[in-house]
Amino acid sequence: MALSGLDIYKLLPGGQKPPHPKANCKECGFPTCLAFAMKLAAKQAELAACKYVSDEAKAKLSAAAAPPIRLITLSADGRKIEVGNETVLFRHEKTFFHPAAIMVRVPDTLSAAEIAKLAKAAADYKVDYVGMALQLDGLAVEAASGDANQFAEAVAAVRGACAMPLVLVTEDPGLMAAGLVKTAGVTPLLCAATAANWEAMAKLAKEAKAPLAVRADSIAGLAELTEKLVAAGVEDLVLDPAVRSFSGSLQTVTQLRRLALKKNYRPVGYPLITFPYLGISDPALEELLAGQQVAKYAGFVVLSKFDPAMIYPLLVLRANLFTDPQKPIQVEPGVYPINRPTADAPVMVTTNFSITYFAVANEVESSGLPGWLLVADAEGMSVLTAWAAGKFDAEKIAKTVKNTGIAEKVSHRKVVIPGHVAVLMGELEEELPGWQIKVGPREAVDLPRYLKTAW
């Protein structure tokens, strides 16, 4: 039974009678022991943050304080991915912390050269999205051939081509054992244990000290298997709800998340792995289902093949879901030179909202014209939003001009402000005596023409 915040507080230093010398010490990051207790009860903090809990209290609190969804880590040659440990159903409640790992299937029926080529392409894939580097997280090597030597060689070929976290996919314990031989230095995910093979898979997972995926087509079946595996000493588990349709997948994964978070039902308190290509032959439908599963609530999503046209929108979707909804994506304020500007190049001001910054920077860069982009700290808001909120006004722009040292970089005293805030021109002239304030276009796409004709 879950403990209430007050029950937990009585076991912390501040709730003892007389109070512990370290009561309300704030070392846990919270102002009081009571505040920390409430966070523990809400599964939004970890007991390890308190250094002064007695062993007796730890024993009582460990189960109550454990995250509702276990944190699972895969690693390979220093690179790791973490999934799970989420505490909310919806990102606006708090935020999501561990992005869904997007991985690509590698069938062992390919030749060694084809496997190496695929693995290297997946490892090298990286795109820039508003200042964030988006990339794949790992590879899922599948024993599609049914041959132990072929599976082992496929794992070896992947390991030789890249250093990415791995999932080994087979329900045959003999094949899994052969693949594991080639995973030195790697903590892979073994996928999957079923009602028919769980004892043998549990033994392999314990020997390899690797997490184990559990596969069943019902929540009851998953819970029954996880309880057996935990009793056998395997605690790092991942759930594979083998329901492959759009509606069935959404319903099942949502129920699993709710049971873990709202009911604190430990047998399903683990991250999920999905295979959106199973049962679907249309790549477009596979991508749609993968997007649904990234949003709700997969920890690992395995795609059928390496296809940048499919991967990029999923990475962008994930990037937008796994950011703090109360903190816009932003770039560092400061001076950004574009196209090697000289002292006579124009100075343009914008806000530090990432999309605004990249829209302006990309237009100037593609024009081939040099310029200095002066980025003001507007708390990550776009130009109009920041202006309306009082975060991008004459005082803020003037402070940015003065504090960034742009005056030492240019031989003129002219600055271009966005057309949307032309109303600030008069105030800015008062804040920046000696500077000429020029009003630029309202949209970034019109900047190249403005720089050629009006500057």
Image: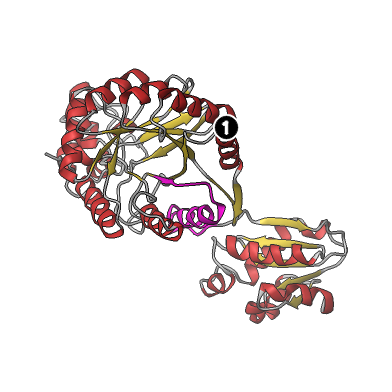
Q: Residue 395 at what x, y percent from top left?
A: 64, 68
Quadrant location of the C terminus in the rendered image: bottom right
Magenta segment: does it hold 317? yes
The answer to whether 205 appears left or right of 256 in the picture is right
Q: Quadrant of residue 173?
A: top left
Q: Nearer the viewer, residue 252 or 86?
A: 252
Residue 81 image position (x, y, % from top left): 45, 37
Q: Look at the image and give the residue range highlighted in magenta.
A: 301-329
Tell me if residue 246 comes above or below residue 159 in the rendering.
below
Closer to the camera, 275 or 136?
A: 275
Looking at the image, residue 347 lies above or below residue 249: below
Q: Residue at x 37, y 25 (%)?
A: 175
At mark 1, the secondary structure is: loop
Q: Position of residue 377 (x, y in %)?
A: 60, 60
Judge whether 307 appears above or below 383 on screen.
above
Query: As shown in the figure, which amino acid type bears the numbered disc 1?
Result: Cys
